[in-house]
Structures are given as structure tokens and as C-alpha cells.
Amino acid sequence: MKTKKKLMAIGSLLTVGSLLMPTSACMASQTNIALTINADASALDASSKISPYLYGIFLEDINFAVDGGMYAQMIKNGSFEYGMLAKNQGQHNYSLSNKETVTLEVVDGSADGTCLNENNPHYALITNTSDNSEGIGNKGYLEGLALQEGASYKFSAFLKGLDGYTGPVEICVSDKSDNVIAQATIPAVTQEWTKYECTFTSSATVNKTLRIWLKIGNGKIAADMLSLFPEDTYKGRENGIRKDIGEYLEALQPKFLRFPGGCAIEGTSDFNQYSWKASIGNGLTFTINGEETTGDVAARPIGVDIWHSSQSDPYYMTYGLGFYEYFLLCEDLNCLPVPVLNAGMVCPIHSGEGYTYFEEDSEEFKTYVQDALDLVEFCRGDADTKWGAVRIAMGHEEPFELHYIGIGNEQWQDEYYSHFDRFKEAFAQAAEENPDMYGDLELIVANGPASTDRFAWDVIAKNGSDYAGLVDEHYYETPDWFLKNIDRYDSYDRDSVPVFLGEYAAKSNTMEAALAEAAYMTGLEENGDIVKLSCYAPLFGNFKSNQWEPDMIFFSNDSLYGTVNYYVQKMFSNNQGTKVLESTLSEDSQGLYQVSSTGEDGSIIVKLVNVTEEEKAVDITLENGDSLAASANVTVLKAESKDDLNNMMNPDNILPEESTLEVSSQFTYNAPKYSVSVIVIPQA
């Protein structure tokens, strides 16, 4: 059992709202609070070590987080593959520039071989019977297209002329008054499928009532895979993510990325389960403009998301941002990938009475196990392996980093743990046969959806501490719960399986919730030897269409903001220590939480969370800190009220403030009311 450093004294507490407050909350402090820190980390044992991967991010395709969100693709249903869940199905989101002379028909070309490939069977037939340039328009996702003045955009499409049409194709973006904002022209089309690309620059900043038009003269063409990207994506990636969203993620300095779910990987049937192989086109090779490609976006079948809500805004997964791109994003963010795969069963929470799973001896279940093994080969295999060759053909010669794989999400049934055992056996056999590829991989086991769940721990008690690499705990609780459970992990068995806190939040985006989360994170850091990874969830919320709140980052088609919860995560992740230092707070410290650590560079990092409505004067004594500098860097997130928050109308209401503070072996820091403070004292 870990010996916990003192975070706060046990004293008389009273609940005000949802925050714990001292009985003297309405009175001025009579004496300063004392915090003593031993800056010497040389004698600390292994229990003081903080996992280098403690703070990360979790991306689930919920709240239109991917298509219509971070994925920079701007055209909705560009493949014409939307189905029964969408209004107008394959024609969903398209309009005609002239209903008298233009027709749009979506056809299935798989029977006669006229489609692009077997994974993308549908395409559009566009006919114009007038002598004017006319065609079809697409308004993009949710809030519509958004263009920035002076910014360049890249359009592409697969086109072929029909019935002898070889004329030009006009691409333009216009508003509802037909004012053209940007335009380009493809001079001529051939009679065979050809991928055409053009770039145009926007003449104005407009974020609503826009449509991108694909127009032809008198004639007929076939069209598929219409695409529009800003040229300036995050890290300049082709088929990449929005630059502004990527920069917000990068600012968090995440140590890992868990993807792509969550419930999204479970589905309510195999119809709407996320498939990592589908997200790379099942490795399909086909020819584009005379060159062979593998796993191209045009070779990826469309999927259905479990979070589908309406026919007007159907939740399809284009897989344009697939596992290949997720691993690239991890490289760009310099973080560890933590993929999660289906355990051969559906989501029990969403399915209700329709809950199903595949029997262990079924061919279907064996496919799920093989998919997990094949993912390792995709990440680590060389050109002599099937899936390693796919990765290399897609453009990534070097292996992708991989250490953990999550098996299932929020499951707790006996059949889940029986399934997990089969995954374990398969990976153990693979490691024996090919230790270089499989030998050091660790599987993450689910534990159910609630803070009180002990399902995985009960199984581990019967099977031993080598049962899994991590236990994935999830819980969404009130701010009061987090404050009352700061010491949750103090008593966890250090010789058992470590913890992955895969999803948590204090059920609000107010300062009250953010403070409770920050206080709780001091406990996570204190127990950074047993809590190996942790991530707030969900990551993204959408201004227009949300299936879940609270969320860490909110976005629209042209803007985004970080919640106060986001800035708490940023402050902790940007200032993570390597070892927890011995520290003690005096007994009058009610409502104040702290954790002190040493950084890789020998700096001292003090995190203070004041959840009360009064400022706290803290007298800090640094023992054995003779080599420290005389000036500290201070970052503070504070609010006037616990109900304050950032929102769409006031996105910068509460932001971290930076300053310096003169320090010595003894100094005083005034922790503002409702605040999170990080004090970093470097080496001299």
C-alpha cells in the first residue's frame, strides 16, 4: 500500500453548493497555511515515480468530432454513399442549380463494373440540358462551409465524361445571393475515371450560406469522391486535420492518444461497429491516374456511427480519417497511440434488450481476434508481411509505435472476460512464435462504466496480477464526488495491474467542475505509480449538434474554444513531474489541495488548487532546496464565481495567466479564490 503524502488536513468541512468549504469560509483567514516540501528526491522509492504517460487525450467519434469536426474534409457525402439513415440517401446534402435543366442520379456501379472500386460502389450522374453552366451544389457539414479571405483550398474529384462530353467542369463557391467567393475550372474531362485537382483562393471570409458547385455545360458526366480541403492543414498533412484543432491538441502536450472509442467501436450490431481495417480500405489496391495506390480514401467503405441522431444530420463515418491517419497524428503530437478494438460484442448500454455477442468458437469471433493480431502486424510488420506491406504501400516505411491495445470498452459481463481470455491466449501464442513483433505488447481490460465497478478487479483477484497490462476505469461524477475521492488510488495494490483512467469528467464545464477535476488530479499525480494513464472525456463538443456534454473543446465550422476543464488539463500536462516529493500541509488547509513534484530538469513543480471563495495565503518552506533559482514561473487559472465558464459567446472568459514570483527557502504564495496555480521553481 502506498503511503500518501498529506494533501489536506482532516478537519471540519461543510458542503457549500457542490464544493467542500471550510466552516470559516465566510471569515478571513487568521493565520497562513503552512506547506513544507522536501526538494531532495534522491532518497525517494519507486512509489514516488510518476508515469511519463499520465496525462493524455481520448478521441471518440461523438458530437461530430471527426467528420464535420477535426477532419479537415469540408464536403459532406462526397462519395454519394450515404444510405437509409440519411434524407435523400445517396443524394443527401446536394441541390441543383437549376431544377428545370439539371438532373442528379446516384447509381450503384458494382454490378456492371463502372464504379471506382468495390469499396465505393455508388457514384453520381449529372446531366445538364441547357447551354448554361449548371450542376449540383453541396453545403458541407452542420453549420455549412466556411472560407477565410486569402486562404487557399484544394478541390479534387473523380470525373468522367459521358455520352461524348469532354468539356470543362467549373468549381465555384457562392453564397445564397450567387456571389462567387472562389472558383476554378477543370478545362476538360476524359471518358475514363480520372482524378482531377484544382486550387482556388477565397475572396472573402464567409462562414454560412455557402455552397460549393460542380457545374458543366450541355452534357453528362459521372462524378465521385468530391473533396475540399484547406491547403493549410495541421502539420501540412494531405488528407489531414484542421490546423486550429491540431494546435489546440498540441498545446495540451498529450502523452498518449486513445482512439477511436468508446462506444463507437462497439456499435449496436456489426452494422455500426468501427472497423480499423475498413478505415484503411481493407488494404485495397487500385489505380488512380495510372498509379497504383493502397488504402486510399477513395478505397474506404463508409461506416455508420453509433451516435447517429437524425436524417438531416446523419452520422456516417467516411473513414477519411482512419487508423493510418490516427497513427500519423500520434507522431505529429509526439504521443503514444492507444488504439481500442472490439471484443466481439456490442455495446450493452446502447443495445439494451438487443445486446448480443459472438460465441467464442464462432468464425465471427475468431475474426475479431485476428483483426487485433493484424493491427500489430500493420504497425510493426515489414514488407514481407501482409499488413506491414499495406502500411508501407500507404507511405509509412518505418513501423508505427505501439505498446498498448484496448480490448473492448465499458464491458463487464462474464462473456466479456471470457472473450478477453481468448485474446490473451492468441497474443501469448503470437508472442511465442514471433516475440519481436508481439512480445512486449500489453492488453487493456475493461471494467464497466461506473466508479463503483470492480468487475475487472474481481477477475484479476482470481487470475493474478499479470492478467492485463492496464485496467480501464471510467466514471462521470459530480464535482462533490471528485473532492471526496481524492485519495481513491491511495489503497490500490501496487503489486497488481496498473490503472488506465480512460474516461472521466465532473459533469460540467463550469469552474466548479474544473476545480474538482484539478483537485482530483493532484491525487492522480500522487498515485502516478499505479495510475499510468488518464484522460478527460469526451474531447470534442460541437456548437450545433451534440450527443454528450460536458466536453473539453467546443468547435464550429470556423472557430473553437477551450473550456476551463481544457486549461486545467493543459496546466497539469504541461507541468508534469517525474517524482512526487514529500510534502505536508498544515491542519488549517481545508479547501486547498496540492501536489509537489520534481521535473526532469530538477525543477520543483507545486500545484495548488483552491476550491473556496476566499484567497489562501500559503507559507511555503523548501527543505534541501539550496540549488534552486530565486524566481519562479507561475501559471494561474482563476474565476470570480464557481459558476463561471467559457462559452461560445465569451470563449476567453477564463484563461491561464502567467507571472513570476520571487522565491527562497521560505516564501508566501497567495492562492486566489476558485483557482488552480502551478508554481515552477527552476534550478539556479
Image (tube, rainbow, N blue to C red):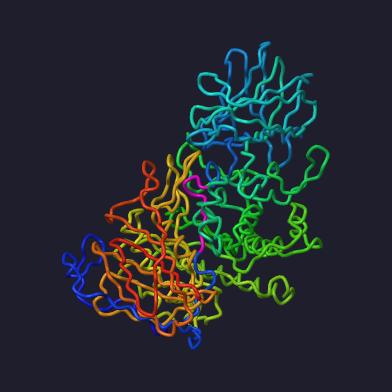
| Residue 378, position as x, y percentages in the image | 71, 60
Q: Farthest residue toward the right?
A: 290
Which residue is drawn at the image coordinates 37% and 74% (left, top)?
488
| Residue 349, position as x, y percentages in the image | 43, 56
Work out whether residue 602 or residue 297 is closer to the camera in this orientation and state it: 602
Which residue is drawn at the image coordinates 46% and 84% (left, top)?
40
Picture quarter with the N terminus: bottom left
Q: Is residue 455 left or right of residue 164?
A: left
Magenta-colored span:
56-65
Q: Farthest residue toward the bottom?
A: 43
| Residue 176, position as x, y percentages in the image | 50, 21
Q: Quadrant of residue 525?
A: bottom left
Does the stretch in magenta take in 567? no
- Which secondary structure dominates the residues rendered in magenta? loop
Does the stretch in magenta take in 58? yes
Q: Is residue 282 left or right of residue 526?
A: right
Q: Is residue 608 left or right of residue 302?
A: left
Is 599 placed above or below 289 here?
Answer: below
Which residue is drawn at the image coordinates 41% and 50% (left, top)?
548
| Residue 183, position as x, y percentages in the image | 64, 25
Is 112 placed above or below 525 here?
Answer: above
Q: Farthest residue toward the top?
A: 131
Is 323 placed above or below 46 here?
Answer: above
Q: Quadrant of residue 213?
A: top right
Image mark count = 0
